[in-house]
Image (cartoon, helix red, strand yellow):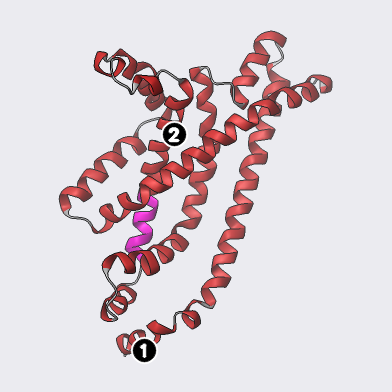
Amino acid sequence: MDLNMMVEAAMVLSSGLKLTLTLTIQALAIGFVLSVPLAFMRAFGRPALSYGVLAYTYVFRGTPMLVQLFLVYYGLGQIEAVRASILWVVLRDPFWCALLTFSLNSAAHTTEILCRGLQSVPKGVTEAAAALGLKRFQTARLITFPIAFRISLPAYGNEVVGMIKGSSLASTVTLLEITGMARQMVSTTFAPYEIFIVAGAIYLALTSIAVKATQFLELHLASDGHSWPRRQTWLKPVLSDHGS
């Protein structure tokens, strides 16, 4: 094992860290924003809406993200209507193709995660809010979603870790993130063993940080949850009546 090569690889691959984090964070953020309304439609919407969302999540969760990326990057460019539209300004750039694919994939997984959390919220809590005169949107924003998010956080942590690792697929469409930089370096140095060990160590460090951050947030929300009934004093009487 060439330690000097590994040190050099660490310095070179660190230049791809920014693109990896950019793709991962932006894809997770966009995916989360998209998934919140989709999760409510999936959990509580009319059958037509619920099944429509289910079809979307079924396709994106049931097919490899690499195939999805190739369909967006290579497939959409073959459609003349796309090439003639303003969308081509975005879709001809591999970065935006990767971000679009990762975002839609993350949204599909997060939608199902949040849907399970929403369906796990006790009905008594939402009934209490309705009895107090809260509108459906107020109940969803102030009560249902915060509780569902706490329930869903462990599973969502797995989605974050999966997206960090999945970002390596961006290298297949010429993007020079960590894996792309590693492949480029291997082609010039012919030292795949040392270089990919370093690349793997960087991904391991990123996923470890994500796991620790998720665990910290879980502990914070769990400890904060103990004080929730005391702060939400406006729910106490109704909850008591419902329990009796």
Residue drawn at 30 percent across, 64 percent down: 137
Residue 138 higher or lower than 226, as above or below:
above
> Compared to 49, does 198 lie above or below?
above
Tell me which residue sits at (39%, 83%) in the image: 234
Q: Quadrant of residue 181?
A: top right
Quarter of the image for the C terminus: give it: bottom left
Along the line of sight, the residue nearer the viewer: 151 or 107: 107
Q: Is residue 197 left or right of residue 133?
A: right
Q: Which mark is residue 237?
A: 1
Magenta part of the protein: which range?
111-120
Q: Position of residue 92 (x, y in %)?
A: 41, 18
Residue ranking furthest to the right:
4
Q: Secondary structure at mark 2?
A: helix
Report if residue 94 lies within the magenta region.
no
Residue where numbered disc 2 is placed: 102
Task: Name the kind of residue labelled 2 in the image.
Answer: Phe
Q: Is residue 35 above or below residue 56?
A: below
Q: Secondary structure at mark 1?
A: helix
Q: Quadrant of residue 117?
A: bottom left
Residue 193's disc is none
